[in-house]
Amino acid sequence: MWMRAISRQICGLILTALLGGLAAATLVRLAPGFDVDERELDPRLSEASLQSVRTERAKERNLTSFYWNYLRRLAHGDLGISHSLRRPVAELLLERGPVTLRLAGWGLAGGWALGLSLAMAATTWKQGFVDFFSVSFASVFLCLPAAVIGLLALFSGVAPAWAIALIVFPKVFNYARGLLGKAYQAPHVLLARAKGLRGASILLRHVLPGTVPELLALAGVSVSMALSAAIPLEAVCDVPGIGQLAWQAALGRDLPVLVSLTLFLTLATRIANTTADLAISAVRIEES
Amino acid sequence: MSVRQKIAILVLSVIFAAALGAGVLAPKAYEAQFRDSPSAQPSRQFPLGTDELGRDRLSRLLYGSRVSLLLAPAAALLATALAAAAGASAALLGGWGERAFVTATDLSLSLPWLFALMTVRAMLPLDVAPGLSITITFLLLGLLGWAAPARVVRAAVASMRRSEFMLQARASGCSGFRLLLVHLVPNLKPVLFTQFLVAIPVFILSEANLGLLGLGVAEPMPSWGNLLRDLENLSELRVNLWLLAPVVLLAIVVTCFQLLVPSEDSAA
């Protein structure tokens, strides 16, 4: 049963990634400026070079043949050559992927630590100063764009991973606060309270265990939050990761890089969500 | 309505009025360049100073607010309408239609849509007119933001389908279309309104992110996104704190919209 569920998830994952890549290629192809190439404005290029640029572009004009050829090369581990950086896309992803994963990983860890601990404090001392302070603190970061948080981090000399943490934390905090608040109203928690249990013991023994499935689902979603935040953040903080590559590829109309990045980011998001789903199933089975 | 929501409406009304009255309230035209006063400090002539091209910052902020405050709700309306159509159809059709909907929303939610937005926006011709860039930016926001609200709508319609009032309406001979218009749509309104309110700050923040990356509304037209690009000059920011005015205004507006979203407690 487990094997069947896992293989179904893997099939779904591959299908979503492939459809995601196709969606990105379609969006790019249909964009009104697809045929525009800045290199055509370069006075240093000869007529022969310009012709070669146009031929290179023409190969990408037919979306079906472009994507089919792309998938054929992908099966052999070849993601094509970046137009703007003139390097193999696979090499660029291998070089920059770990930077972004490290940044997002630390950011997620920081965001979760901050968000969950503040949510626990706010629900334990509800209606008090801690609740007011943590709600206000989260609201400040919730209403700022990721790129502005990145600039403010740069301005105050804070590491970019902290900026990701500050982007992820308000969402974790708001969700966890609501969830824990509801869990505190559960009949078994009220009974435990009536029996005299207080503070950390009630939180750790009765409130938190009941919210694990929902928190795991949020953990899956927060990975995509962190990866999305990494794009503007790496661009403004000059971090040489996937986000910066995405920005450069978008500005350079670099179709092979854009399609590969969409596949990579879609796959990362789906892997995170699938892992969370499997973990939730495991927790529910153990509970029952 | 809570006191906080009343205050939020009041603040938003003032900001909306100022943005709509930009033509009257702004001391200068947003594109007018005063070449003898570039990067000027705040003064009586330029209350928030000027940018490096000598354009009045206050006027640009007022006109920029108009762009962001009018178009983000329009994009949110489009996203909500798409979500309502897709979510309600999926819940009413059931079977393959519902499965196709689930696959489409899964795919849409797995896509890094800020990245997709950035890509398509970057693909626009280099000489794109400012008006067209605004329309395309917000149209894309509206078109790409349908998936999350559509899931909520589908769940709401599915639960309404099983509800007693729908059962009673069906038992008393209410036809499919009448059932939809008289019973389903009115009960769906609060859900749709909440999704609309949730989408507005999301779109405002997305446009701001795009603008800061140079992929938002094209110059010389101001928007909160491209006004935030002044923050990139960190050394100037240390001495000229009024450069933070667009961030402060954006934060106030986003907070007000977030306060307007009914909480689960109040909805119950």
Image (cartoon, rainbow, N blue to C red):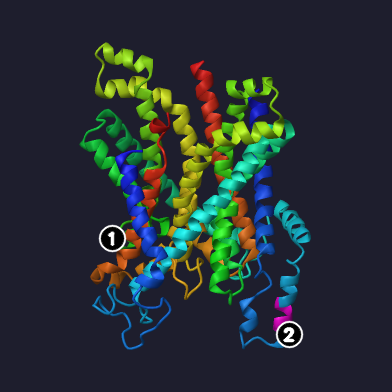
Q: Mark 1 falls within which chain? A: A
Q: Is residue B235 left or right of residue B171?
A: left
Residue A10, can we see it? no
Verify whether residue A49 appears in magenta. Answer: yes
Q: Mark 2 falls within which chain? A: A
Name the spot of residue B79 as percent of width and height, x first: 57, 49
Asked if both marks, 1 and 2, belong to the same chain, the answer given is: yes
Query: Badge 2: few (under 14), some or many (20 or more) residues near its Cα, within 10 Å?
Result: few
The quadrant in which residue A120 appears is top left
Q: Which mark is residue A48?
A: 2
Along the viewing direction, whichever of B93 and A222 lies nearer the viewer: B93
Verify whether residue A220 appears in magenta. Answer: no
For badge 2, the amino acid type reads: Ala
SS at mark 1 in the image: loop
Name the spot of residue B255 as percent of width and height, x first: 36, 50
Along the viewing direction, whichever of B86 and A91 lies nearer the viewer: B86
Q: Is residue B151 above or below residue B136?
A: above
| Residues rendered magenta in the picture | A48-53
